[in-house]
């Protein structure tokens, strides 16, 4: 992995934030050094409001925080059947996954071209990763996020076929569990939604999240050290 150097911004400390307050700062940039420093502190970027050309870049720390304990993932029989028709890859189409996450839905509108460019830089440096779900030669689902040590900060996911995004999540958990120390690793999903709750996502207080983050960061990463690799099961 490539070290982007120190962050030039004085980012807020979520431990000092008022309970329930989510947007802790506005401004800064999406440079790799800024992004990595933010995730290591328990922050992530997302625009606050307004038109794309007039949005403020906010730094968020939800309270409570949505996380998926690696031993809590719920895989239904129907999902297991669905997964048999998919091919899963890792880091085979990172930017394509990001753009697909932004397609046709209001909740993905914050994934602007600038986000794609800067997170793709993180990917090239070995810090951001994607899981792709294929049906034949079509990309039908996937997710992406940032990994620092034992933290995987899931950013977004998408599906074009039923259960494709769930299949990507199952594959992600397999990667994380396969690296060892599953009780210390932290899979952050930002917020618990009704959909994610069916898969085992729970809410924890911000203080608990920050404590778990400090436990996870010293662990070795689960994804391969190179930023890209050949897709598994595809040529």
Image (cartoon, rainbow, N blue to C red):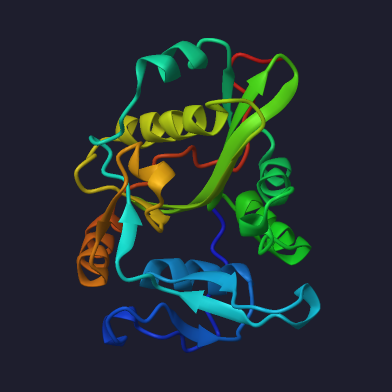
Q: What is the quadrant of residue 205 in the picture?
A: bottom left
| Vertical placement of residue 75 versus 150, above or below | above
Outermost front residue: 194
Q: Nearer the viewer, residue 174 or 139?
A: 139
Question: What residue is rendered at 63% in x and 26% in y?
Answer: 161
Location of residue 117 with respect to 43 vertically, above or below: above
Which quadrant holds residue 5? bottom right
Residue 22: percent from the left, percent from the top? 41, 77
The answer to which of 172 and 232 lies nearer the viewer is 172
Looking at the image, which residue is at 69% across and 36% down? 93
Residue 90 position, x and y percent, is 56, 32
Q: Is residue 69 above or below residue 38?
A: above
| Quadrant location, the C terminus | top right
Q: Position of residue 47 (x, y in %)?
A: 62, 74
Q: Is 202 drawn above or below residue 89 in the view shown?
A: below
- Tell me: 151 left or right of 229: left
Residue 186 on image: x %, y %: 31, 51
Query: How many numbered tags mark residues here?
Result: 0
Residue depicted at 49% across the width and 86% down the height? 25
Residue at x-position 33% and y-position 62%:
65
Front residue (pair 142, 181): 142
The answer to whether residue 129 shows anywhere in this view is no
Q: Is residue 76 visible?
A: yes
Left or right of 197 on screen, residue 139? right
């Amino acid at each position: 992995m490539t070290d982007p150097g120190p962050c030039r911004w004085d980012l807020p400390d979520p431990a000092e934030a008022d309970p329930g307050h989510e947007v802790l700062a506005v401004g800064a940039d999406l440079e790799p050094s800024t992004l990595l420093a933010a995730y290591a502190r328990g922050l992530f970027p997302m625009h606050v409001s307004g038109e794309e050309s007039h949005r403020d870049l906010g730094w968020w720390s939800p309270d409570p925080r949505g996380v998926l304990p690696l031993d809590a993932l719920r895989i239904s029989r129907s999902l297991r059947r669905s997964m048999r028709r998919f091919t899963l890859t890792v880091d085979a189409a990172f930017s394509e996954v990001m753009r697909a996450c932004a397609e046709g839905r209001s909740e993905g509108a914050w994934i602007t071209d600038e986000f794609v460019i800067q997170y793709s830089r993180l990917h090239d440096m070995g810090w951001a990763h994607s899981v792709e779900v294929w049906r034949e030669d079509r990309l039908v689902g996937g997710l992406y996020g940032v990994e620092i040590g034992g933290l995987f900060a899931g950013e977004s996911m998408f599906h074009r076929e039923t259960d494709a995004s769930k299949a990507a999540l199952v594959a992600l958990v397999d990667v994380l569990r396969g690296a060892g120390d599953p009780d210390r690793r932290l899979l952050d999903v930002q917020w618990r939604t009704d959909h994610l709750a069916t898969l085992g996502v729970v809410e924890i207080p911000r203080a608990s999240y920050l404590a778990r983050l400090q436990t996870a960061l010293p662990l070795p990463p689960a994804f391969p050290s190179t930023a890209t690799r050949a897709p598994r099961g595809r040529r």
